[in-house]
Amino acid sequence: MADFESFDSKGNPKSSKKTGGKGWAVWILIILVLIVLKACMVVTYENQFKLVRRFGKVERVINNAGISFKIPFIENVDIVPNEILLYDLPASDVITSDKKTMIVDSYVLWRVTDPLKFAQTLSGSVTNAENRIDTIVYNATKNTISNMTQDAVILSRDGKMTVTVTSDDSDVVSRDITVDEETAVVEITSLTEEIMNHINSIEAQYGIQILTVDVKKLDLPDDNKQAVYTRMISERENIAAQYDAEGQAQAQIIMNTTDREVAITISNAQAKAEAIIAEGEAEYMRILSDAYSDESKADFYSYVRALDALKASMSGDDNTVILSEDSPIAGIFYGRY
């Protein structure tokens, strides 16, 4: 079906101004609706809290992720983080109970637990919260280390562990070390736990929670670092010398014990050998006695002994033997055997 258009006197089609004006009005209306709809929508992500304010006053807190709505141009929205946050504290100087200065560099893991309280007390500012955390953690760290010796701080740096101490190490043992007198083993609480014990709960006051405080670096000031290292080296050398002396003494005891056991073993073996030889000789004499007591064999054994005696007497270069007629050896040649 053909479309019909109106033409002017010159044959040109006439434009429809009324229809074009309605089209632009529709598009403007749609854009206005989208703007108002966007102004009404509040999109909350998993890692966020949303605070809906009306004329500066918090009307409600959006805790769950999703889409919600607000009154446009009257209510506005503030964002509060709903995740674990990391705050790296600046390095600070602290003094131990034995008046030694140490540099502590630590960090804090914290989170917002009550966004309304967080907004009321800290204006919903992460910077304000970190400033408050800085003061609290520094005071807790200072109070903890000021009640510990430098050696105890160093021992507790690597976390909860057990070490063996002697009476000479009594100066290391302080209130933060539990001693078992029977086993001479002490349990050292980690420095992190000690600091956390000195931090009072601030959740009810500020709506935030400090999850953990960890010391990432524990160092000495540059001006006395070399002196401390020299003292530590000297102490370790003394301990090494003591261990070496104890080892030498123990080695000497073991060598003396071994020598005594060897001497006893050799003496027992020699005594047993002598006893065996004596038994053999006794058995030899018994066999000879039995042999000589038998008249049928006595001549033969006398003959054999005479030959043995002749053999023994003819050793060396002198092969001349002078024998008397009644000599047992001469009896061999006279046929008496």
Image (spheres, rainbow, N blue to C red):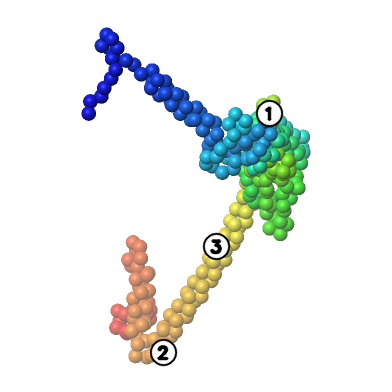
Which of the two marks, 1 or 3, is nearer to us in this view?
1
Q: In this view, does 111 lie above or below 322?
A: above
Quarter of the figure with residue 137: top right
At horizontal 48% and vertical 30% (from top left) the residue drawn is 34
Judge whether residue 239 can be spotted in this image.
no
* Quadrant location of the N terminus in the rendered image: top left
The structure residue drawn at horizontal position 68% and vertical position 28%, both measured from the top left corner, is: 221
Query: Circle 2 sits in a helix, a strand or a loop, which is it?
Result: helix
Q: Position of residue 54 (x, y in %)?
A: 65, 33
Q: Is mark 3 on a helix, strand or loop?
A: helix
> Which residue is nearer to you in this view: 116 or 68?
68
Q: State whether residue 140 appears in this view.
A: yes
Q: Are marks 2 and 1 in contact (CB under 8 Å)?
A: no
Residue at image coords 53%, 30%: 36
C-alpha distance separating marks 3 and 2:
46 Å
Res 165 label:
none
Q: Name the residue under label 1.
A: 221
Question: Which residue is labeled 3 in the image?
Answer: 262
Tell me what residue is drawn at x 37 percent, y 91 percent: 295
Q: Mark 3 and 2 residues: CB-CB less than 8 Å, in contact?
A: no
Residue named by callout 2 = 293
The x, y position of residue 280, in whole percent, is 45, 78
Q: Residue extending furthest bottom?
A: 295
Residue 45: image x %, image y %?
Answer: 53, 39
Left or right: residue 302 versus residue 119 is left
Badge 2: few (under 14), some or many (20 or more) residues near its Cα, within 10 Å? few
For marks 2 and 1, give the one nearer the viewer: 1
